[in-house]
């Protein structure tokens, strides 16, 4: 059995632009279900601990047609999270950074998360990030001062499918920042799911519809360890 740490944004509210965001339902629950079904333990953490803010858009019919992920959310599975400052990174075999636009605000430059990512990586574990979740990888620096994804093939949420006008208020463009340090690959947008292994320890996925694929890839990788 492996121990997996799923990291969620605590949420962000932009009063000026009447915009609120957080973590994305499917991006936690699809991999979590796959990992737990395979016998692994999944713990959840966030910057502030407690109950983090979910992006309610992730439960709309376009994204959650059967209400599967909303039901899991309402079950309270993500109501109690550890604070990132209290996480003992050495205990974990995998760190999974869950997406949602909230990750752009409170996870991207969180030094405690960077510490956890580096520790898991240095111990031979897996670093996984979904959709907007790869943002923290850009600023996770290795001892040589370079990003952990420097020069590696990665993916993440592309600019061209961001909601209209949202790039104007986001703190940065994920695609543009990733492109500065890594080989960004959005894949074929006509294909439902896309995930990329940067090396044998780092995997990124493109969008919410790649969440099940992320779960499958992590289960497979842990079986082979």
Image (cartoon, helix red, strand yellow):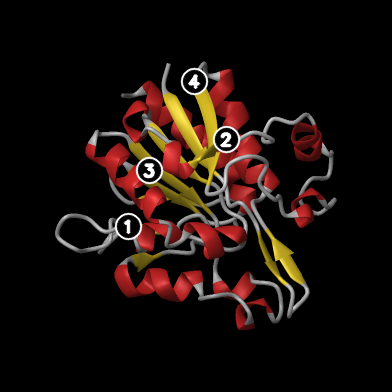
User: Going from the N terminus, do you reach mark 3 or mark 4 first?
Assistant: 4
Labels 2 & 4 near each other (Cβ < 8 A): no
Secondary structure, mark 2, is: helix
Labels 2 & 1 near each other (Cβ < 8 A): no
Q: Marks 3/2: CA distance?
A: 14 Å
Residue identifier under label 3: 127
Question: Which of the 4 image quarters holds residue 100?
Answer: bottom right
Q: Position of residue 124 (x, y in %)?
A: 25, 34
Question: Which of the 4 image quarters holds residue 183?
Answer: bottom left
Q: Is residue 122 visible?
A: yes
Q: Marks 2/1: CA distance?
A: 23 Å
- Name the foreground residue: 123 vs 115: 115
**Drawn side of residue 189 relative to residue 59, left or right:** left
Image quadrant occupied by the C terminus: top left
Q: Marks 4/1: CA distance?
A: 26 Å
Residue identifier under label 4: 40
Query: Which of labels 4 and 1 is toward the front?
Result: 1
Q: Position of residue 84 (x, y in %)?
A: 46, 43
Labels 3 & 4 near each other (Cβ < 8 A): no
**Drawn side of residue 53 relative to residue 84, left or right:** right
Secondary structure, mark 4, is: loop
Q: Marks 3/4: CA distance?
A: 16 Å
Compared with 119, 189 (above or below) is: below
Residue at screen point 59% across, 19% down: 37
Compared with 96, 131 (above or below) is: below
Label 4 packing within 10 angstroms: few (<14), some (14-19), many (20+): some
Query: Which of labels 3 and 1 is toward the front?
Result: 1
Q: Position of residue 207 (x, y in %)?
A: 59, 56
Secondary structure, mark 1, is: loop
Label 2 packing within 10 angstroms: few (<14), some (14-19), many (20+): many
Residue identifier under label 2: 31
């Amino acid at each position: 059995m492996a121990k997996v740490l799923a990291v969620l944004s605590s949420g962000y509210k932009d009063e000026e632009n009447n915009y609120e965001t957080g973590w994305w339902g499917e991006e936690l629950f699809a991999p979590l279900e796959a990992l737990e079904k395979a016998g692994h333990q999944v713990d959840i953490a966030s910057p502030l601990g407690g109950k983090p803010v979910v992006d309610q858009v992730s439960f709309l019919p376009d994204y959650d047609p059967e209400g599967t992920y909303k039901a899991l959310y309402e079950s309270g599975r993500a109501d109690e999270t550890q604070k990132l400052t209290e996480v003992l990174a050495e205990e974990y075999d995998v760190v999974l950074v869950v997406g949602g636009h909230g990750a752009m605000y409170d996870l991207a430059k969180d030094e405690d998360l960077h510490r956890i990512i580096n520790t898991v990586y240095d111990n031979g574990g897996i670093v996984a990030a979904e959709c907007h979740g790869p943002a923290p990888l850009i600023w996770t620096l290795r001892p040589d001062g370079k990003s952990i994804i420097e020069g590696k093939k990665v993916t993440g949420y592309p600019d061209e499918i961001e909601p209209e006008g949202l790039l104007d208020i986001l703190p940065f463009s994920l695609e543009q920042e990733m492109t500065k340090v890594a080989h960004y690959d959005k894949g074929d947008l006509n294909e439902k799911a896309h995930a990329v292994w940067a090396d044998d320890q780092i995997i990124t996925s493109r969008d919410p519809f790649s969440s099940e694929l992320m779960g499958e890839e992590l289960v497979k990788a842990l079986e082979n360890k």
